[in-house]
Image (tube, rainbow, N blue to C red):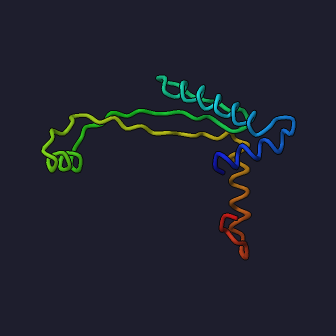
Amino acid sequence: MNHSQMIAAVARRLRQFSRRDVREVYEALVEVWQEELVQPDGYIRIEGLGKLYVQQQTIRSTGVVRAQAAKQNKPAPALLTRYYFRFRPVKALHRRLVASREQATEPGKDTRHE
């Protein structure tokens, strides 16, 4: 679901709000969530959905990174920072996901996304 589809779907369910109203709330949520996620140990816990968080890993640069830097006549950085963007669903969502995938893979079922 993309941005426009999500705004339209929420506006259909909350008929007292216009698409513009829904878009404003969505944009405010995104701003708040971004501010939280850039904080060390920041996370967003959305009831009924799950937890969104970022993990950071510092690694030594080797191999490919050093080779690319050498090709560009630049010094390779000694350390690199890698970010992992994680989502951990609540148990109920996880169970629904597993059940829907199991139904989709039953013999004779079309597993393509509709």
Residue 21 point in image, percent of width and height = 75, 33
Whether residue 9 is situated above or below residue 107 in the rendered picture: above
Q: Nearer the viewer, residue 92 or 40?
A: 40
In the foreground, 31 or 96 = 31
The reply, left or right, for residue 109 in relation to residue 60 is right
The answer to whether residue 40 is above or below residue 99 is above
**Residue closest to the far bottom:** 108
Q: Picture coordinates of residue 81 (x, y %)?
A: 34, 35
Q: Name the quadrant containing residue 69.
A: top left
Left or right: 55, with 20 as reference point: left
Residue under the point 37% across and 38% down = 82
Q: Given the current orientation, which residue lies at the most extreme right position?
A: 16
Left or right of residue 36: residue 16:
right
Residue 72 % position (x, y):
16, 47
Residue drawn at x 73%, y 50% is 96
On the picture, is 70 further left or further right than 17?
Answer: left
Q: Quadrant of the C terminus?
A: bottom right
Q: What is the count of numbered marks? A: 0
Q: Position of residue 58 (x, y in %)?
A: 33, 33
Taking the spot 67% from the left edge, 68% from the top edge, the residue there is: 111
Q: Quadrant of residue 89?
A: top right
Task: Name which residue lies at 60% across and 39% down.
Answer: 88
Q: Nearer the viewer, residue 82 or 15?
A: 15
Q: Is residue 104 above or below residue 89?
A: below
